[in-house]
Image: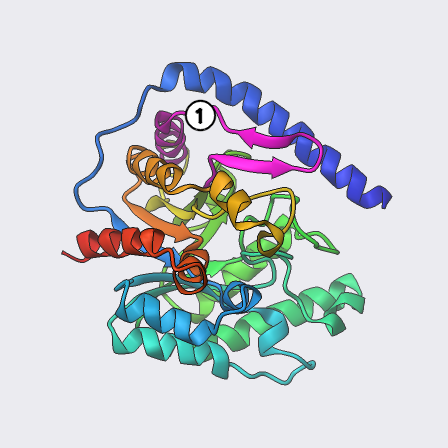
Amino acid sequence: MHRHIKRTLKIIATAIFVLAVGFVVWLMSGEGVTKPQNTAWGVTFSPRQADYLGLNSGKVFQAMLDDMKVRNFRIMVPWYQVEPEPGKFNFSDVDWYLKEAQKRDAKVILAVGRKLFRWPECHEPLWAKHLSQDEFESKLLALLEQEIRHFREFPNIVGWQVENEVLLPFGDCSPLPNLELFKKEISLVRSLDSRPIISTESGELSAWIQIGSLVDRLGVSLYRMTNNSVLGKMYYPFRPGFYQKKAAFSKVLNPGLQDIFISELQLEPWGNKPLAELSVAEQYDRMSLERTKNILSYAQRTGLGEIYLWGAEWWYWLKEVQKDNRFWDLGRELMDNSNK
């Protein structure tokens, strides 16, 4: 309990500091750039999230490909799924998604490692939780090698995302990720394949500098409203120029950084309890169609031209279960414009 309180206080202290600095930047930032005409839209897809919402994850993915016409995906390889027992690997589930994407000429950023997107953030199997630090690191690096050697045969993988927000102390992670191990992971992946190395940072709670110095491409999240167990609803005061200036500053400090994109654009409700436990009215209160459109417009005004939607599984749930296809149709419109 003490460890979780300490971690929560650390997150709150970080948030307060970043918000204070961000407010100053906000005063100077302005409204950002004119919307780019050719935003490359994509989806961060989680089969686990689809299953959690009571959906058939394979059917949801095919609907994204064939109905919404998504052609850019970010997909992860959960450690617990592909190595359920030490040294015994099964990549068939992830293979299926990659093959379905390949049939439609859809590109994929494949996220590998331990700390990946969606709760609990760290996705190691139960057997790995009881290893010593040295054994844990050895097993993680062995996993990475198996993953890259296997998945590098897929030509539609356009980059390897190594870990997700690895320096952000958020999630159910013990032991906590560390920078030195992250550097070893990057070095290993570079030795096995030549495709770009990607990782991610929090758009609001990170400086984008340290991770940006280690990778070829940097993905950042963009959240407008969050929920904290202590503070309740939190609205970030930043204007689009905040992200634009952070990106420019990061590129100046890291000239080897090819580009920065939005890897996680918040478009699903974040309430004071898990999504499936929120009433439909509470879900709409947290993420109405009007708010969704405002966030999409806001994200475009950051000038970051590649944007991955976060919450399309929920859109499908609204369409199929609540018979509300407005959000899904909005996604179709975005993808149609992106594919022209």
Identify the residue at horizontal 52%, vertical 40% (top origin).
Answer: 210
- Toward the viewer: 243 or 118? 118
Identify the residue at horizontal 39%, vertical 32% (top origin).
Answer: 243
Instruction: Tell me where the magenta segment starts and ends, as one range.
Output: 222-251
Residue for badge 1: 238
- Toward the viewer: 250 or 268? 268
Its colouring scheme is rainbow
Identify the residue at horizontal 29%, vertical 38% (top origin).
Answer: 300
**Left or right placement of residue 217 versus residue 41 in this view:** right
**Residue 264 percent coordinates (x, y):** 44, 48
- Toward the viewer: 232 or 209? 232
* Above or below: residue 307 compared with residue 158: above
**Residue 131 percent coordinates (x, y):** 79, 68
Q: Residue furthest left?
A: 340
Q: Is residue 239 magenta?
A: yes
In which quarter of the view is residue 101 placed?
A: bottom left
Q: Amino acid at mark 1?
A: Phe
**Residue 185 percent coordinates (x, y):** 55, 61
**Residue 2 percent coordinates (x, y):** 86, 42
**Left or right placement of residue 21 versus residue 72 in this view:** right
Q: Is residue 51 magenta?
A: no
* Above or below: residue 179 compared with residue 81: above
Q: Is residue 172 visible?
A: yes
Q: Residue furthest right?
A: 2
